[in-house]
Image: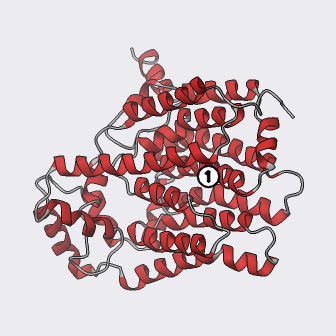
Amino acid sequence: MNTEMSQPAPKWLYRLAVVALFFVLVRNLLPPNAFTGTVLLFDYNFGLIRRGMIGVAANLFWGDTVTVNEVYLISVLMAFFGTGMAAVLFSRRLPATLAGYLLLILLFSSFAFAAIMASTGYIDLILIGMVCLSLFTSAATKGGVLLRIAVAVIGVFMHEVMLPYFTVFYAFDIWVSRPLQKTLTRFFTAILPLIGAIVSLAILNKWGQLPPESYAAFVDYIDAKSTFPANPESTIVMKRTLADNLSVMAEKRGMLDYRSWVLFDGIPLFGMTLWMIWFNLKLLGPQASALTRFAVISAILAPMSLNVIAFDVVRFGAISVFVGFLTIASQMHTDPTTCDRLSRIMTWPMFVIVLFLNLNISVNQLNSGDGHEFLFPWVLVKQLSWVSSP
């Protein structure tokens, strides 16, 4: 065992993690883009529709008309909820050892975590907060499983990305929490949140699709509801089916901007995702079954599967990295021997290298910021633009 890494961490190291969290918030808590600001206006005025649940709740706050400042306030509260729940969860789940605090610093310093914080106004932040809140309960109890099922179902009605984002992770979380249960019972218990999410998505696809004849009235309603112009890219989502999304993506993949996102955003995030998979597999230990290893890999890669039907490379890659940290937290909570393995895996050279790379890499900001353009690898575009200019 690496005895140094297993020792209690000094208080200054925890304070450094808090400072890292502070800086990632200050640098990335910027105004939401027009797309997310418009999505927050969706409600059930035209019946059950996708992504309308948040708007129903928000209507209690902003009434008949919505101003930009009200959208900003809701977006900030969403960011604080998601960030706050994640910070408290990892602070409690990771051991108070040197290795645990170094991992906490890597999370808060990760360019993937920064990308999540830069998704101001995205419903993703509410989903993150709900999932982290549910993890304060044990998946080994019936109440913990029921809470995870409830979050999975409600999350899909908030935004359908909940299904690949976190329900596969929930399956892993429940699976590793019940090592003494019979395999078949353990398996079916683990996939209950996933089943609940699939049923919820099926309900939305069957009864939550906005009728084509209602689309124009829906756009007019959103325009009248807000004091700012509705983003047409947001409202058109209500017209698209799964087949439409596949067609859009087939066209997108041939575009230079999408290929640039994949090159400059997708590759760094995928690299960090692979590191998270490696770290989790090492943390599982040699005694872990093939099914457990498959479960952790599936949980981490599941958010990236959305690249097939949508073009938000940064969102999906960043969530995959975040899920990698969640799977570590689950292991820490369910297996006491994981702490010892963490102390062996985490070394100073590994910490320095991973931290160095994360602090010097940036991906596309999802809010109104453009600071990523001056960091690697996007700065290469700036370099090429002035070097190649006449």
Q: Is residue 211 left or right of residue 329?
A: left
Percent across and percent down for residue 79 are: 37, 47
Residue 12: quarter of image: top right
Q: Residue at x 17, y 46 (%)?
A: 69
For label 1, the crowd category at 10 Å Cα-Cα, with few meaning under 14, some 14 to 19 and many 20 or more, is many
Q: Is residue 195 above or below residue 127?
A: below
Answer yes or no: is residue 372 visible.
no
Coloring scheme used: secondary structure
Residue 357, x across and y down, in percent: 62, 27
Q: Residue at x 27, y 67 (%)?
A: 57
Nearest the camera: 249 or 116? 116
Residue at image position (46%, 72%) is 242
Q: Is residue 387 left or right of residue 234?
A: right
| Quadrant (top left/top right/bottom left/bottom right) for the N terminus | top right
Residue 348 position (above or below residue 293):
above
Q: Quick one: 390 or 181, which is closer to the camera?
A: 181
Mark 1: amino acid: Leu
Residue that appears at 27% across and 64% down: 235
Q: Which residue is mark 1?
A: 326
Looking at the image, residue 376 sits to the left or right of residue 70; the answer is right
- Residue 235's place in the image compared with 229, above or below, is below
Residue at the far right: name it: 286
Asked whether residue 54 appears in the rendered view, the answer is: yes
| Percent of width and height locating residue 38 | 25, 57
Q: For residue 3, which quarter of the picture?
A: top right
Q: Secondary structure at mark 1?
A: helix
Residue 317: % across, % down: 56, 48
Above or below, comparing residue 282 to residue 223 in the picture: above
